[in-house]
Image (cartoon, rainbow, N blue to C red):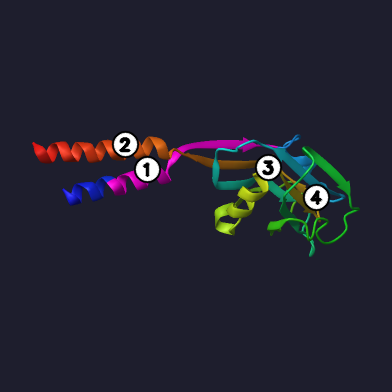
Amino acid sequence: MKKIVLLAVMLTFAFCLSGQAAVYQFMPTPSDMYGLDHDYAYNWGINWDHSDEIIREARLTFYNIHDWRPENDDILYINMVDNAPVGLTEYFDNEAAGDFFAGQGVTVGTWTDPGGSFYGPGVNVTFTFSDLGLLSALNSFASDGNFGLTFDPDCHYFNDGVQLEVITSVPEPTTFVLFGIGAVGLAAFRKRS
């Protein structure tokens, strides 16, 4: 009997850790962010109410991205910020070297095109937030319904679109506690039989 009760408790705990998962996909307008022109820096603000959900994963993907031409200082800087104006905002930075948004938020990463060519070929580049240790920051930043991503291309980064995919889960402890109680009851009934 003790083994069956222990198994029921373990199953209940395992199910409580899961929940209904949801996948959200966000794309800026325009989706290629005007080709990430080197004369500008970009702030992409997202409003999103997910108060009952916990972010379990996020991926920022650049589709078919490629540099205009190879140069020594070609870097695309990417950060995540706590608050941002909704939509895509451009800031003229006159192709200044360095990160226009340095010191704001947390760094997502940087990328440099090793080949660099106006005509491509491009590559898909993905930043996975769990691998980068950014899930806690994303959950914190997005908790009030607004967060943003910033981009500062120090060269012209042509692309076929940028997408943020967020995967969440909704814990349902009440349902699974009831399941566990039912499993314990079934175990007790089977023991009597």
Q: Amino acid at mark 2?
A: Phe
Q: Quadrant of residue 161?
A: top right
Q: Label 2 near label 1: C-beta < 8 Å?
A: yes
Q: Which mark is residue 15?
A: 1
Q: Magenta segment range?
A: 9-27
Q: Residues within 10 Å of mark 4 (few under 14, many from 20)?
A: many
Q: Which residue is mark 3?
A: 144
Q: Amino acid at mark 1?
A: Phe
- Compared across the picture, whether 143 is left or right of 13 comes to right
* SS class, disc 3: loop
- CA gap, disc 1 and disc 2: 9 Å
- Compared across the picture, whether 20 is left or right of 97 comes to left
Q: Which mark is residue 156?
A: 4
Dot 2 or dot 4, earlier in sequence: 4
- CA gap, disc 4 and disc 1: 48 Å
Find residue 178 and report its horizontal and vertical position in percent.
33, 36
* SS class, disc 2: helix
